[in-house]
Image (cartoon, grey):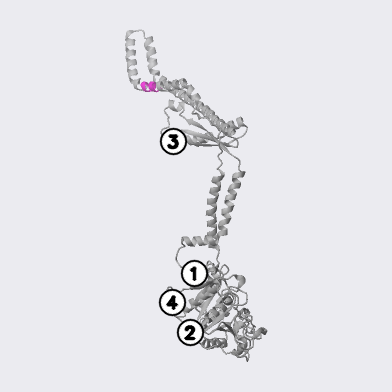
Amino acid sequence: MEWDHPPTLGRVTGDELELRDYLKILQRRWIWVLIPLLLIPFLAIVNSVRTPDRYRSTATVILQSTAAQEAVGQDITSISKLRREIENEINVATGDEVEAAVEATLGELPAVSVSASEDADLLFFSATDGDPDDAANAANVWANAYVEVSRVRAQGSVDDAVDQLQVRLQELRLERQELRADLDALEDRLVLASTDTQRAQLQNQVDRLAADLAPELNVVDSQVSTIASSIAELQLTGELAAAGTARINSVAAPSSSPINAPMSRNLTLGIVVGLIAGAGLALLVENLDRRVKTSGDLETATGAPVLGTIPIAAKDLGEPGLITLRSPKSPVADGYHKVRTALQFASMSRTMSSILVTSANQSEGKTSTAANLAWTLAATGKTVALIDLDLRRPRVHKVFGALLSPGLTDVLMSDLTLEESVSTVVHDGVEMSVLAAGTAPPNPGDFLASPAVTAFLREVSRTVDTVVIDAPPVLPVADALTIAPHVDGVVLCAFAGSTEKEQATNAARLIDQAGGTVIGTILVGVSARDAYTKSAYYGEESTDGDAPTPMNGSRRNGSSNGNGSGKPESNGVLTMPARTGSSGS
């Protein structure tokens, strides 16, 4: 099969997450959503129960211009000046002088806040207390203390204004006296003159000097008159100054309802916040979790297409026997059938006579995958050989309950023939050849790198339709990388929730660098839902007659006949089945 977009190592798709992707994440991380969803509303309820009721009362004070400002023409008309004046009044209301007066009255400082109205010259004195009467009393005491302090400050401003005007008035009177000094002297001489001639001369001098001084004297007299009027006005309106710049506009009354948020609102808010926090926490955990969980994660990490997903639990990986035989109607068996179908499509565009199955790490399902994949391929009528090349931790023989030796190493390192070492598994007319690992060599890495192994694999590939090889994991040892260039394709297994994305990426990159070709990946350990299978669809599973039957001949492990005991054939002379068709069929 030719992929529409050939896989590129490390390719990351540019598709953005859709709503259903987020919903899948929340479904997968439901525990992280549930924790805040339960905890935050619970804390909200506890807070509502444990928080005592609080009551708030507010007294209002209206601000007005001082008598001194009105007397000297300093009314505040600019908006910026008005705002600044109101801020000054708030500072006075919360200042030390007012606080000292309140503390002297109540014996303590209550919790009172002072704020200003946006569209009126009003100050709000809001007191909060566990007792509604105490809250109202605190607000009224604080407001009255501020009014009294404002009155004293206003009276002081009037007195200061009068003193300033008196000083100025005295200065003007002295200036007038200085201006009239010469004129007053002439007038005194005129009064003392004894002759008409003297009186006439002095009168002329007085008239001329008076005319010269008249403009200056008129200015001084006008200023004296104005200041005298201002002083008189301040003195006559002293009662206004005594009233101060502020007065009580409304008295605080005890509140009948607490200001605490009702429990229902706290609970609703807690649920909303819990949902948001839970969703955020789930997405954060998902982002921090570097493990492969979905086929999309695996494809993104390796750049290779996902051939299928296998819904098998980790505890079932080590069980003997083939799941495709033990539970042929299970979702797991169907998963292997889908992998086989994907490989058959892939074989249409390239030769697929030898397939190496490996994984990034151990215990990720490669052996179970290799065995079940080989059997499903054999079930199509192909001649298939399953070879265990994991010489360090061989497990293929355990799947079939066979012996480790003789096997591959015994064929290549002793006088044993291939026919003497191969076992053939038979069931319902389907047969498959199995070659165990054999006796462990001193250095497995050097053994697998030898030309003899390469030649052996090449020869076996010519003998059967498909060779499936169980190889060691890629990251711990280099054994699989040694064999990868000599097979037609590599299938990389990953275990959902265990294999890390970086590990899968590194494994695929190492195979590519070694000259191998990752034709696809398999995600093992997914849930049946994620694998898009439902076990109920397959009906009741049957375990009767599922065990493979060995071919005629002597048997390992002591089986004496071919009655379906499930034991593979032993060291008897076995001829591997002839090829039934081309490798691309």
Q: Amino acid at mark 3?
A: Asp
Mark 4–mark 1 distance (CA, rounded to whole Å): 18 Å
Q: Earlier in the sequence, mark 4 or mark 3?
A: 4
Residue bearing mark 2: 583
* Label 1: element kind: helix
Q: Quadrant of residue 227?
A: top left
Mark 1–mark 3 distance (CA, rounded to whole Å): 62 Å
Residue bearing mark 3: 119
337, 276: nearer the viewer: 337
315, 113: nearer the viewer: 315
Q: Amino acid at mark 4?
A: Glu
Q: Nearer the viewer, mark 2 or mark 4?
A: 2
Q: Which residues are magenta?
A: 217-223
Q: Residue 369: x and y, percent?
A: 56, 76
* Label 2: element kind: loop
Q: Nearer the viewer, mark 2 or mark 1?
A: 2
